[in-house]
Structure formats: C-alpha cells, structure tokens
Image (tube, helix red, strand yellow):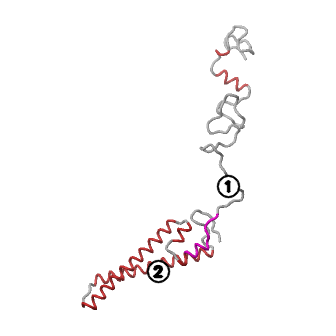
Amino acid sequence: MNCNNCGNENVGEICNRCGVPFSNYPPNAHHQEHQSHGYPPHGHNPHGYPPPHGHHPPHGHHPHGYPPYPPNGYPPHPPPYGYQPQGKSKVVAGLLALFLGLGIYYFYLGYIKRAVIQLIMWIGSIIFAVIGTILVAIETESYYVHGTESLPMLITGVVMMLVGYLVMAGVGIWAFVDGIRILVGNLKVDGKGNPLVQ
C-alpha cells in the first residue's frame, strides 16, 4: 500500500518515510483496500458469501445467500409433502340441491353470489305468488257475494300469481339440474377451486 503523501510503499499504520498516518487517506482508500482483498462492494453479495467482519447484509437479505424471509421474520411453512386441499362432498351438495334448493347447496359449496341470487329469486317468487293468490281470492269473493269486482285488481292478482309460480318453478328446475350435474361429476370444484370429494 502506497502512502498518499509521499508515495512510499508501507505495510504499517504510519508511513516510515514521512510519518503520515493512514487515517489521512482519502475516503475511498478503505473501499479500494476491501476490493483488493476480494470483498464485494458494500450492499452486494453475488455469490452468497457473508460480508466482511463488521459489515451487515442489506435489509431483507439472508447473510448466507438464502431467499429473504417474509415480513414477520420467520421462514414460510410449506404444506406436508403430497398434501392437496379437499373440497366439499358432492353427494351432500347434490342431495341439498335435489331436496332443498333455496341456494343452500350453493352456500355449502362456497358460491355465495349464486346462492344469494337463487335465494332472492325463491323468496320473491313466493311473495308474488301469495299476494297474487290473495288478490284473486278477494276479487272472486267480491264478485260472488256483492256482484261487483275490480277488473284491474283482478288482472294484477292473476299476473302476480302467474309470475310467482313460474319463477318458483324455474328456480326449482335450476336446483334440480344442478343437483344432477353435481352427482354425475359435471361440477368438479367448489367455490375456492378445490376438487369435490365423495
């Protein structure tokens, strides 16, 4: 190593010619010295070797070249070898669809949006059918008892009754077809993408 003041070669901490200590070297002198001894620049660890003594690895990097740990500081725990998440039972889902419907089997499988839509359609069809039936009954009784009837009210009741029963039948057919599809294996995964089991 050469003295920065006189250029004399030195191996100690003070120049044996001019007496200038090495602490007066420019700021990059120590950096060049580390590079001359084979150390990588600060913040770089291309081969996974630990940094020189007294230096700390960059934040988020393992000192031995392993992948960085997650934010909590602990390495991830992989699932056991050969483990595969299992979905819901297709037999249970199929039976719920065939005998109950009402979106219950969709809730069981994890298809929440479909379940809510089917449930709302089922409840709405029941309400329409009941109100329509009541209106038709009231107008029929009024015609036979008092001899008068409200034609608009009667038509409204008939339309609501027909719409309610048609939607109810449609939801029932929807659930029945889904039950068959689940049991024969056409629907293979649940709402999370896990395969259905027996």
Residue designated by label 2? 169
* Position of 129 relative to 3 (above/below): below
Q: Which mark's residue is nearer the viewer, 1 or 2? A: 1
Disc 1 marks which amino acid? Answer: Pro
Q: Distance from label 1 to label 2 (Cα)?
A: 46 Å
Disc 2 marks which amino acid? Answer: Ala
Residue designated by label 1? 79
* Position of 184 relative to 70 (above/below): below
Secondary structure that dominates the magenta span: helix
Q: Judge by depth and name the residue closer to the eye, 25 or 195.
A: 195
Q: Which span of residues is magenta-colored? A: 86-96
Instruction: Write the residue at 66% across / 46% down.
Output: 75
At numbered mark 2, what does the secondary structure look like: helix, strand or loop? Answer: helix
User: Dividing the image into 4 quarters, which one contains the N terminus?
Assistant: top right
User: Dividing the image into 4 quarters, which one contains the C terminus?
Assistant: bottom right
Q: Which mark is residue 124?
A: none
Q: Is residue 146 left or right of residue 64?
A: left
At numbered mark 1, what does the secondary structure look like: helix, strand or loop? Answer: loop
